[in-house]
């Protein structure tokens, strides 16, 4: 998906959701009645593409973790199977049980949402936070073209919106992952340093992102 | 598509999003019960503080940078037995 296509797809999904009277975050939290629970994944079992395994979930942390401005965030993943071959250039999840039971995921970035329901920043997390397979920046970027939530559980237009957003925000995601790798190489490339949770963060201005690619 | 579209206006939730509340079955802090932890396959409550046992990898070029500690493998580089895996990581 080119940036121009991503910008158009994101606008289209936004307009459809707005015109229906059920905006983006109301759809994400449709199952959260009357309010979301801390830590609960929305959708409950994540939205996972049947083709390729792209995945997301949204959740909320306690306010003492994230501050009063953030409502929650999306964690966006590629499937390990989507990574370039030969594989093996990765740090595995810790623990045989975790490797056997957890979905084999590669964390792309997290998208922070404010209390009004608007995206405000992208950030990366240390490997232990999601118990992911940790791949370096260049390999994730090479696989990012495969990120596609079409057909995943959850709301169709949310899936379209997030797919478009990831493709639109590729340059920002690239910068984030470079910063993450530098942070990890300074501390612990295994991703097990528990004092380091957020490895990089960049504010997002959605309007600017889109307007760069629409005429 | 027109630049006149205001995305924030269209995305904003009137009245704001409802505040998240602590689940009834678990503490609001990052200290879930085992059953709750099992139901949340991966977040920072799940991961337990264990020392990394094995690292498979590294970035191309790491072998040259750490000739005593990294060996070539099919996927690129890998730490030799007994070596500190972190030394094989990308150096930015």
Image (spheres, grey):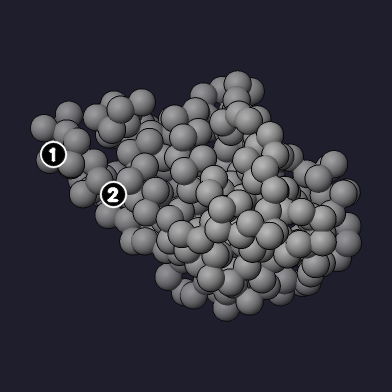
Local secondary structure at mark 2: helix
Residue drawn at point x = 56 percent, y = 22 percent: A151
- Name the quarter where the C terminus of chain A is drawn: top left
Residue A77: image location, x then y, percent: 57, 42
**Residue B41 located left or right of residue A105:** right
Q: Nearer the viewer, residue A138 or B58?
A: B58
Q: Nearer the viewer, residue A44 or A127?
A: A127
Q: Nearer the viewer, residue A12 or B72?
A: B72
Disc 2 chain ID: A
Residue on which disc 1 sits: B3
Mark linked to residue A86: none
Residue A12: image location, x then y, percent: 30, 29
Q: Which quadrant of the figure has residue A64? A: bottom right
In the rendered image, the vertical position of residue A145 relative to residue A22, given as above or below: above
Dot 1 and dot 2 within a common chain: no
Mark linked to residue A206: 2
Disc 1 chain ID: B
């Amino acid at each position: 998906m080119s940036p121009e296509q991503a910008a158009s797809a994101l606008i289209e999904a936004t307009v459809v959701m707005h015109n229906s009277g059920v905006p983006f975050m109301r759809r994400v939290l449709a199952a959260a009645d009357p309010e979301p629970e801390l830590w609960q994944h929305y959708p409950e079992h994540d939205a996972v593409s049947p083709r390729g395994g792209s995945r997301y979930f949204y959740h909320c942390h306690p306010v003492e973790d994230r501050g009063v401005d953030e409502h929650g965030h999306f964690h966006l993943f590629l499937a390990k199977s989507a990574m370039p071959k030969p594989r093996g250039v990765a740090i595995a999840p810790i623990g045989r049980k975790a490797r056997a039971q957890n979905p084999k995921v590669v964390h792309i970035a997290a998208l922070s949402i404010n209390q009004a329901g608007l995206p405000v920043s992208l950030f990366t997390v240390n490997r232990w936070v999601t118990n992911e397979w940790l791949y370096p920046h260049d390999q994730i970027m090479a696989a990012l073209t495969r990120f596609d939530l079409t057909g995943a559980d959850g709301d169709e237009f949310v899936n379209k919106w997030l797919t478009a957003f990831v493709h639109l925000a590729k340059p920002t995601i690239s910068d984030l992952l470079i910063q993450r790798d530098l942070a990890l190489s300074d501390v612990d490339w295994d991703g097990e340093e528990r004092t380091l949770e957020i490895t990089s963060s960049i504010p997002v201005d959605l309007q600017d992102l889109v307007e760069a690619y629409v005429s | 598509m027109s630049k006149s579209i205001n995305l924030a206006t269209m995305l904003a939730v009137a009245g704001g999003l409802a505040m998240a509340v602590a689940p009834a079955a678990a503490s609001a802090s990052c200290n879930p019960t085992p059953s709750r932890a099992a139901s949340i396959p991966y977040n920072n409550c799940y991961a337990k503080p264990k020392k990394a046992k094995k690292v498979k990898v590294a970035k191309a070029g790491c072998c040259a940078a750490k000739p005593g500690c990294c060996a070539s493998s099919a996927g690129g580089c890998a730490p030799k037995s007994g070596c500190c895996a972190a030394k094989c990581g990308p150096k930015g």
